[in-house]
Image (cartoon, helix red, strand yellow):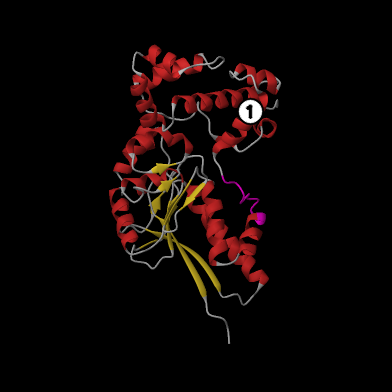
C-alpha cells in the first residue's frame, strides 16, 4: 500500500510589475526540491507545486522587464500558503504610488486571510500586507531601505528591518529580494523534512543560516522621510561623531527641548538620540572598513570611541559580524 500523498501548494500572487526573481527563484527552488525528493525515493508521496493566483480574472501578467507569465488561476484555488512578491520601484514615493494601484490584490489578501490561508510577503511586498491592515500589532520585516518610510506610514506594525525573516505562523515577511529563499527553505523543512531543505540549499548554493539583513544595510542608500528637525539633528550628529555628545547639546543645537527631542527620535527613528548616535558611528565604521586600510583602532578613534573592545562589541551587535569579518566580506577590491 503506497503512503498517502503529501501535497504542498504555494500560491504566488499575480501582480503586473512584480520582480521576476520573486517568482522564478521560488519556483526553481521547489522544482529542485521535488527532483531531490524523487532521487532519494522514487515513490515519494511528496508533491510540491507553485501556482499563480490573480485578483483580476486575467489569464497572464506582465512582470518587470516585460516578461509575460501565466496561466493565472482563480483566487478560490486551494492553497497552503500565498506569497506576495516584491515589485520594482524608483523611490519610496513611487512604491507607495504603486501599492495604491494594487487595490484588487489587497482585497484578495484580506479575503484569503479570512479563509485561514497563511500569507507571506517578500521584499516590498510587505507594503501590501501592511496596507491591508494585516500586519497591525505584529512583528514584521521588509527591504531595509524602506525602514523610515514604512514606520511613518504604518506605525502600528512592529518593524525590525535587521531581521531576514519574521515568521508569526499565519503571516510571515522577509527582507530584501533573496531573503525569501531562506524562508521557503524553512517552509520546506516543515512540510517535508530538514534534510531535503538542507540538500536543496546545497544544490542552489544558498546559505540558510543567514538571519540578519544588518551586514547589508547602507545608510547612504536608505530612504528616510524628510523632516527639518530630523535632518538638523542627524546632520549635527554626523559632523560631531568623533567626540562625546550630550542630549542637552543636541537639543540646544536643534532649538528644541530635550523632551521634544526624545519624543521626535522615538517617532521618526524608533530610537533614542544615543542609540541613533551609536548607529551612525557603526555606519561610519562600516564605510571606513570598506574603503580604507586604516587599522581598527584608528577607525574606532574616528568614530568617537576610545575603547576598541567596547566598540567591537557594539559593531558585532549591530551587524552580526566582527569588524574583521565585515572588512573581508565587503571591502572594495581593485580590479
Q: What's drawn in magenta, residue-wise?
A: 202-211
The verdict on residue 203 being magenta is yes
Observer able to see residue 256: yes
Observer able to see residue 18: no
Please state which of residues 2 and 210 is positioned toward the viewer in this rendering.
210
Image x and y of residue 193, in percent: 60, 66
Please tell me in which quadrant of the rendered image residue 212 appears.
Answer: top right
The verdict on residue 137 being magenta is no
Which residue corresponds to mark 1? 310
Q: Quadrant of the C terminus?
A: top right
Residue depicted at 62% across the width and 77% down the height: 43
Please state which of residues 2 and 164 is positioned toward the viewer in this rendering.
164
Q: Is residue 258 left or right of residue 237?
A: left
Please state which of residues 216 and 205 is positioned toward the viewer in this rendering.
216
Q: Main secondary structure of the magenta part?
A: loop
User: Which residue is farthest bottom?
Assistant: 1
Image x and y of residue 110, in percent: 31, 56
Q: Is residue 142 above or below residue 233?
A: below
Q: Is residue 242 left or right of residue 145?
A: right
Residue depicted at 34% across the width and 62% down the height: 75
Image x and y of residue 21, in percent: 51, 48
Q: Is residue 72 left or right of residue 304?
A: left
The secondary element bearing badge 1 is classed as helix
Amino acid at each position: 500500500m503506497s503512503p498517502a500523498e503529501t501535497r504542498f501548494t504555494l500560491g504566488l500572487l499575480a501582480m503586473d510589475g512584480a520582480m521576476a526573481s520573486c517568482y522564478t527563484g521560488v519556483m526553481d527552488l521547489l522544482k529542485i526540491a521535488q527532483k531531490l525528493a524523487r532521487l532519494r525515493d522514487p515513490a515519494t508521496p511528496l508533491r510540491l507545486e507553485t501556482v499563480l493566483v490573480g485578483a483580476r480574472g486575467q489569464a497572464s501578467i506582465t512582470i518587470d522587464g516585460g516578461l509575460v507569465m501565466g496561466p493565472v488561476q482563480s483566487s478560490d484555488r486551494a492553497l497552503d500558503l500565498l506569497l506576495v512578491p516584491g515589485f520594482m520601484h524608483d523611490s519610496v514615493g513611487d512604491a507607495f504610488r504603486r501599492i495604491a494601484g494594487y487595490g484588487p490584490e489587497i482585497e484578495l489578501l484580506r479575503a484569503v486571510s479570512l479563509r485561514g490561508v497563511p500569507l507571506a510577503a517578500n521584499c516590498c511586498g510587505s507594503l501590501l500586507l501592511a496596507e491591508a491592515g494585516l500586519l497591525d500589532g505584529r512583528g514584521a520585516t521588509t527591504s531595509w531601505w524602506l525602514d523610515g518610510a514604512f514606520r511613518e506610514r504604518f506605525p502600528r506594525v512592529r518593524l525590525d528591518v535587521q531581521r531576514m525573516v519574521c515568521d508569526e505562523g499565519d503571516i510571515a515577511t522577509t527582507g530584501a529580494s533573496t531573503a525569501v529563499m531562506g524562508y521557503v527553505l524553512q517552509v520546506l523543512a516543515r512540510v517535508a523534512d530538514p534534510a531535503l531543505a538542507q540538500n536543496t540549499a546545497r544544490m542552489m548554493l544558498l546559505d540558510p543560516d543567514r538571519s540578519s539583513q544588518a551586514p547589508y544595510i547602507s545608510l547612504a542608500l536608505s530612504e528616510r522621510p524628510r523632516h527639518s528637525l530630523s535632518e538638523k539633528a542627524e546632520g549635527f550628529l554626523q559632523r560631531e561623531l568623533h567626540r562625546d555628545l550630550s542630549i542637552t547639546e543636541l537639543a540646544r543645537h536643534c532649538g528644541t527641548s530635550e523632551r521634544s527631542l526624545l519624543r521626535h527620535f522615538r517617532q521618526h527613528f524608533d530610537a533614542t538620540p544615543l542609540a541613533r548616535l551609536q548607529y551612525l558611528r557603526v555606519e561610519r565604521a562600516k564605510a571606513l572598513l570598506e574603503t580604507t586600510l586604516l587599522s581598527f583602532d584608528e577607525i574606532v578613534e574616528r568614530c568617537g570611541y576610545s575603547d576598541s573592545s567596547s566598540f567591537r562589541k557594539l559593531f558585532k551587535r549591530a551587524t552580526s559580524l566582527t569588524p574583521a569579518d565585515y572588512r573581508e566580506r565587503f571591502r572594495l577590491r581593485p580590479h
